[in-house]
Amino acid sequence: MFANLIKEIWTTTPGLKNLLLTGVDGIVIEKQSDSEEDEFIAAEAANLIKECQRFGHELGSGELQFLTSQYENLIIAIQMVTDEYFLLGLVEDAKHLGMVRYRFNLKAYEWYSAIA
């Protein structure tokens, strides 16, 4: 099930360099492209999510839904699917970020509906 949904995002969303479905424990559940950095990226993103969730709870902001980090040559987009799983995409060009966010949000809702 997860492989098909990841593949659908990959094939319909321009601009993605890499795409992972990861647990908040940092373990990659499913991925679309192979990179030797996948495990590192997933673990670091999981740590970042935990810190952002802690920060949000301190502010009384509710649960983390989407997180973006933009760098000179890369954008990291993270969409929470449930409180245990998240989508992580590496985007090379900012012009694709809106579509990535839209597709991530749409598929996260579908996955949540399938899981819950």
Image (cartoon, grey):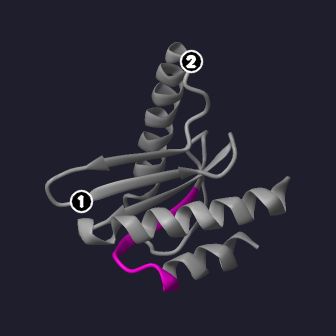
User: What label sits on residue 60 in the rendered view?
Assistant: 2
Left or right: residue 84 compared with residue 55 = right
Q: Residue at x 60, y 73 (%)?
A: 6
Q: Is residue 7 above or below residue 81?
A: below
Image point 56% across, 18% down: which residue?
60
The Cα–Cα distance between marks 1 and 2, rounded to whole angstroms, is 30 Å
Is 58 drawn above or below residue 63 in the view shown?
A: above
Decide whether residue 16 is among the magenta residues: yes
Amino acid at circle 1: Leu
State which quarter of the image contains the N terminus: bottom right
- Say which amino acid is labelled 2: Gly
Query: For residue 2, which numbered disc appears in the image?
Result: none
- Secondary-structure class at tag 1: loop
Asked if residue 68 lies in the magenta stretch, the reply is no
Which residue is at 51% across, 24% downward?
56
Q: Nearer the viewer, residue 22 or 70?
A: 70
**Residue 32, image x, y percentages:** 52, 74
Location of residue 15 (image quadrant): bottom left
- The numbered mark, 1 or 2, whose residue comes first in the sequence reads 2
Instruction: In the rendered view, tell whether residue 97 sits above or below residue 76.
Output: below
Residue 44 in the image, given as x and y percentages of width and height? 42, 41
Between 79 and 32, which is closer to the camera in this rendering? 79
For label 1, the residue is: 74
Q: Is residue 91 left or right of residue 52?
A: left
- Relative placement, left or right, of 106 versus 100 is right
In this rendered view, identify the residue nearer to me: 98 or 76.
98
**Segment tinted magenta in the rendering:** 11-21
Q: Is residue 18 something one can see in this rendering? A: no
Toward the bottom, the furthest residue is 11
Q: Is residue 10 visible?
A: yes
* Residue at 38% over, 66% down: 98
**SS under mark 2:** loop
